[in-house]
Image: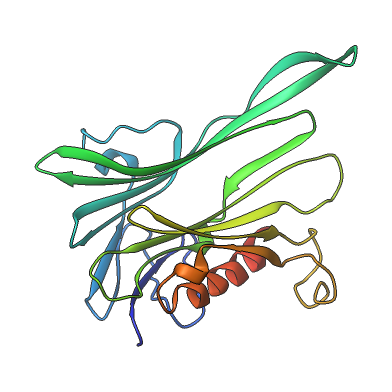
Amino acid sequence: MPYKTIGYFIRGILLSNLLTACNNDNALLQNEGEIKVEVLVKDEVPNGIIYTGTPEMILKWMDKTGENYFIGTTSTEATKQETIDGDEWEIKEKNLKASLFTNKLNNSNLVWQLNIHENCNYDLFLDFIAEATTITDIDNDSIAEVTFTYRKSCRSDISPSDIIVEMREGKDIYLLEGIGLVEGISTKQASDTLFGKYNDKHNFDKAPSGFLNHAQIVWKNAIENEYK
């Protein structure tokens, strides 16, 4: 293996040959004993870690920075009435948060947090693609990289969603941004279109070797699992 890696998927789907999955969602996932990631339920989160929303995934691991917790949450979709150009519309609202905490002796610290808020007067989609979430140490510096994926769209037809693969190490952020597939269309069928492809690579020109390749693998897995 060229680098240490651990992948986590709620439904136990493998990400290429990089990941080792297990049969029990609450079991320990690991690769050659180098990085160990535990999948938690909300009752197992230390009391000092405060988050809002419904947890979609909670991951715990140890690295050089100490005990780490990645928590991805979404809010319940809310609605409100607004007048737009003289017409009454029902506006949907939803939040998505991705947070990294460290914890030592029950003293918690928020390392970073992504907070996305979306409004929509049609059908609102804002959620994680859990099958495209990994914890890795690609650059072998004993500080884990967290890679996660979410989609967002406001649509009244079968248009694709925006897909964002976000890779973070400490406060460094790297992004792949593009559009997903139209539901019912395979990656092979979409090969000659813009669907299922990213069009922006933010900061990967400054990233350590291997980061972009890993993000591209995560992107492929996100596209293949968006509608599962």
Q: Which residue is drawn at 47% across and 83% down?
A: 17
Residue 220: image location, x then y, percent? 62, 71
Query: In the drawing, does residue 179 fall left or right of residue 104?
Result: right
In the rendered view, tell whether residue 32 sits above or below residue 159: below
Q: Which residue is drawn at 53% across and 32% down?
A: 75
Q: Residue at x 28, y 39 (%)?
A: 43
Residue 56: image location, x then y, percent? 46, 45
Nearer the observer, 116 or 11: 116
**Where the C terminus falls, by quadrant?**
bottom right
Residue 9: image location, x then y, percent? 46, 62
Tell which residue pokes out farthest to the front in this image: 206
Q: Which residue is drawn at 54% across and 69% down?
A: 218
Residue 72: image location, x then y, percent? 44, 45
In the rendered view, tell whether residue 136 sits above or below residue 89: below
Query: In the drawing, does residue 38 fall left or right of residue 157?
Result: left
Q: Is residue 14 visible?
A: no
**Quadrant in which residue 79 is drawn:** top right
Query: In the drawing, does residue 81 fall left or right of residue 10?
Result: right
Count the marks.
0
**Where the N terminus falls, by quadrant?**
bottom left
Query: In the drawing, does residue 11 fall left or right of residue 112?
Result: right
In the rendered view, tell whether residue 118 sits above or below residue 27: above
